[in-house]
Image (tube, rainbow, N blue to C red):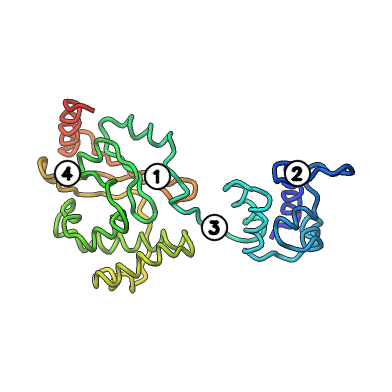
Amino acid sequence: MDRPQLADFLRRRRESLHPRELGLAMGTRRRTPGLRREEVAILVGMSVDSYSRLEQQRGSQPSEQMVSAIARGLRLDPDERDHLYRLAGYNAPFRQASSTPVRDATLRLLDRLHDTPAQVVTDLTEIPAQNRMARALLGDQTDFTGFARSFLWRWFTDPAARRIYPAEEHDHHSRVQVAEFRAGLARRGADPYAEDLVERLRHESSEFADLWDRHEVTVRRLDTKRIVHPELGLIELECQTFASESEALRLLVFTAVDGSQAAEQLRVLAERLAAQPM
């Protein structure tokens, strides 16, 4: 807990809020810029003395629940909330994937990669966005609902999902995907939906249950993938991963070594797309 920085941050955020923004009466004797300490205490649901002590660098460490209440009371945006948690001595809560939409800049980047497959993947292995090359290479992965939005779910419950990789590599992909998924859930923290997904997978797939019980963890940042394309055959590509600030979203980019057979296969794929209407 960083008492001086926490006190300064709380005071400055309190002073930056205007009473009218929160539906509070201005009064005739208001000398404090922004909100009064007692007004923040009411919004947060803590005693005036407890809140005042935090601003005076004398308070004990607030609970995580109280930090969350302070963040709501002071109308902090996600980055400010994360900063508040760290000043109070806690890891910032994971930002749910549902509250972390794919940014317009990322979508523009996908569209500009005309000859390179790329897609966005969440920590729940959902794929909310692909460019045309990725759809041509891997099929449309965005048009699913329910648990089927998760590629991990489809991998362990739908044999068709495994056709993109050679059969002799399925065991390897199963093991790595589960280990990477577990690492993502640890960053995410308590999440009823994610926990339900795991329990349902354990019930539906004994293979998943066995791998989950191993408690293996990994994070892939650069990987070689051998992808089976229905028309072009086996394509060996390098998959580079770029994580967002919260790690809720990752950008996967598939590239081939210049002059390789895979580079020629991607060129053919790009030419076929160029000949098709958008």
Q: Are marks 3 and 2 in contact (CB under 8 Å)?
A: no
Sequence-wise, the earlier of marks 3 and 2 is 2
Question: What residue sits 79% from the left and 45% below the top?
Answer: 25
Measured along the vertical axis of the image, is residue 46 above or below residue 259?
A: below
In the picture, the quarter occupied by the C terminus is top left
Residue 19's label in the rendered image is 2
Classed neighbour count for the residue bearing mark 4: other residues with Cα under 10 Å, few (<14), some (14–19), many (≥20)? some
How far apart marks 3 and 2 lie (CA) works out to 28 Å
Secondary structure beneath disc 2?
A: helix
Image location of residue 91, percent across then percent down: 57, 59
How far apart marks 2 and 1 lie (CA) works out to 42 Å
Amino acid on which disc 2 is placed: Pro
Q: Closer to us: mark 2 or mark 1? A: 2
Residue 41's label in the rendered image is none
Q: Which residue is mark 4?
A: 235
- Left or right position of 68 against 220: right
Q: Are marks 2 and 1 in contact (CB under 8 Å)?
A: no
Give the quadrant of residue 272: top left
Closer to us: 193 or 242: 193
Measured along the vertical axis of the image, is residue 65 above or below residue 79?
A: below
Sequence-wise, the earlier of marks 2 and 4 is 2
How far apart marks 1 and 4 lie (CA) works out to 22 Å
Image location of residue 246, percent across then percent down: 49, 50
Q: Which residue is mark 3?
A: 93
Image location of residue 212, percent across then percent down: 33, 70
Sequence-wise, the earlier of marks 1 and 4 is 4
